[in-house]
């Protein structure tokens, strides 16, 4: 997420009331999670296990809970609670703005696009040409939708990321300031949910087709020409490359990459990245050819046990 205008290190430190290390005029251009940071961004880290990863990332400003050696060319913001301060910055630069009507005056809707009754379209939403948005679709603020997109009834685009920090008093939500971006020629079925990014975009690539009742988590990027069947759940921060097929009730773990041309058979549970143009099945999922061979062997176990018992009886005689 880029700020509306460049800030300085001193200005950001003042906003969140924390100490800083570096030139007070050090430029601060935005804030992002570590997997999408760029030079000029703030990234936060609050566990020693991830200090090095944050300090060596592309981010040039690190919001951290301990004074450490600052890498050359970077700056630090030091706070006892970086998670809290990150939320403060999101609230300041991307605050929630209530709507007072069903379709916001700031929404831009393209030529020949049909919006069916009972839809909600939030602030700063852009919808392209020749789209059909069926009834009871909710499109949250800042969502971008391309041309020739169809979205069926009950779908929600842009709900909060499922991202929480456990505290003694309960769970604390990381606030979402990102967007959902739907590219051209995408079809989205009924009752799907696509969460907005925390600071960046959750993206559905051109020409991809989603069945009904699909969940896609925050900051996940779905490639072009993908086919996703019903009741599939994809966690946050997943990269799904082009021409991937997922059949019904597939589950995908956060942070993995589903390589180009992968096919995932129904009810597979994916907990690690896949290889290009291969087919997977099972939980945990691995190559379908090997899985089916294993299942064939398992089916032979009762027969093998019977044979062994028969041999034992013969040997006793």
Image (spheres, grey):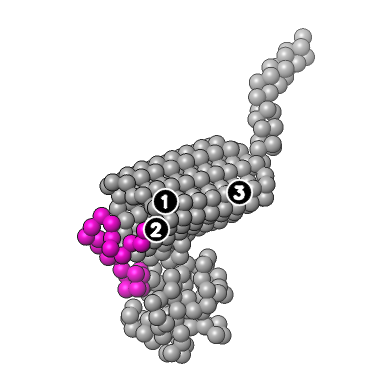
- Crowding at mark 3 (Cα within 10 Å: few <14, some 14-19, many 20+): some
Instruction: Give the residue at x 55% y 74%.
Output: 58
From which residue to which does the magenta span run? 87-109
Instruction: Give the residue at x 43% y 74%.
Output: 2
Instruction: From this view, report whether residue 201 is shown above or below residue 241.
Output: below
**Residue closest to the eye, 4 or 134:** 134
Tell which tag, 2 or 3, sits nearer the viewer.
Answer: 2
Q: For numbered disc 3, what is the local secondary structure? A: loop
Looking at this view, name the residue that lies furthest to the left.
100
Tell which tag, 1 or 3, sits nearer the viewer.
Answer: 1
Residue 285 in sight here? no
Q: Is residue 305 left or right of residue 169?
A: right
Q: Mark 3 sits on what residue? A: 243
- Crowding at mark 2 (Cα within 10 Å: few <14, some 14-19, many 20+): some
The image shows residue 317 at horizontal and vertical percentages of: 77, 9
Q: Mark 1 sits on what residue? A: 131
Q: Are the residues at dot 2 and dot 1 in contact (C-beta closer than 8 Å)?
A: yes
**Residue closest to the eye, 119 or 26:** 119
Whether the magenta-drawn stretch holds residue 249 is answered as no
Instruction: Kindly report the distance in space between the C-alpha atoms of the residues bearing marks 2 and 3.
Output: 28 Å
């Amino acid at each position: 997420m880029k700020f509306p205008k460049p800030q300085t290190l001193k200005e950001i430190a003042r906003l969140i009331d924390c100490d800083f290390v570096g030139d007070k005029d050090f430029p601060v251009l935005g804030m992002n999670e570590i997997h999408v940071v760029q030079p000029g961004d703030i990234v936060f880290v609050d566990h020693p296990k991830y200090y090095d990863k944050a300090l060596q990332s592309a981010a040039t400003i690190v919001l951290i809970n301990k004074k450490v050696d600052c890498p050359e060319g970077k700056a630090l913001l030091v706070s006892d609670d970086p998670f809290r301060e990150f939320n403060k910055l999101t609230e300041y630069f991307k605050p929630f703005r209530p709507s007072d009507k069903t379709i916001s005056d700031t929404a831009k809707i393209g030529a020949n696009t049909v919006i069916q009754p009972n839809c909600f379209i939030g602030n700063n939403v852009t919808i392209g040409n020749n789209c059909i948005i069926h009834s009871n679709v909710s499109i949250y603020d800042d969502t971008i939708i391309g041309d020739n997109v169809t979205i069926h009834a009950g779908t929600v685009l842009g709900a909060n990321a499922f991202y929480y920090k456990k505290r003694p008093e309960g769970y604390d939500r990381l606030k979402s300031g990102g967007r959902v971006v739907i590219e051209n020629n995408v079809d989205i079925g009924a009752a799907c949910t696509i969460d907005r990014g925390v600071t960046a975009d959750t993206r559905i690539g051109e020409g991809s087709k989603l069945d009904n009742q699909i969940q896609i988590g925050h900051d996940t990027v779905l490639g072009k020409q993908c086919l996703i069947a019903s009741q599939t759940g994809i966690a946050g921060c997943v990269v799904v490359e082009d021409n991937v097929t997922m059949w019904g009730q597939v589950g995908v773990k956060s942070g993995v990459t589903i390589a180009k041309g992968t096919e995932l058979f129904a009810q597979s549970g994916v907990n690690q990245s896949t290889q290009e143009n291969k087919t997977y099945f099972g939980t945990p999922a691995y190559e379908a050819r090997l899985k089916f061979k294993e299942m064939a062997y398992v089916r032979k176990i009762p027969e093998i046990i019977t044979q062994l018992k028969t041999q034992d009886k013969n040997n006793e005689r």
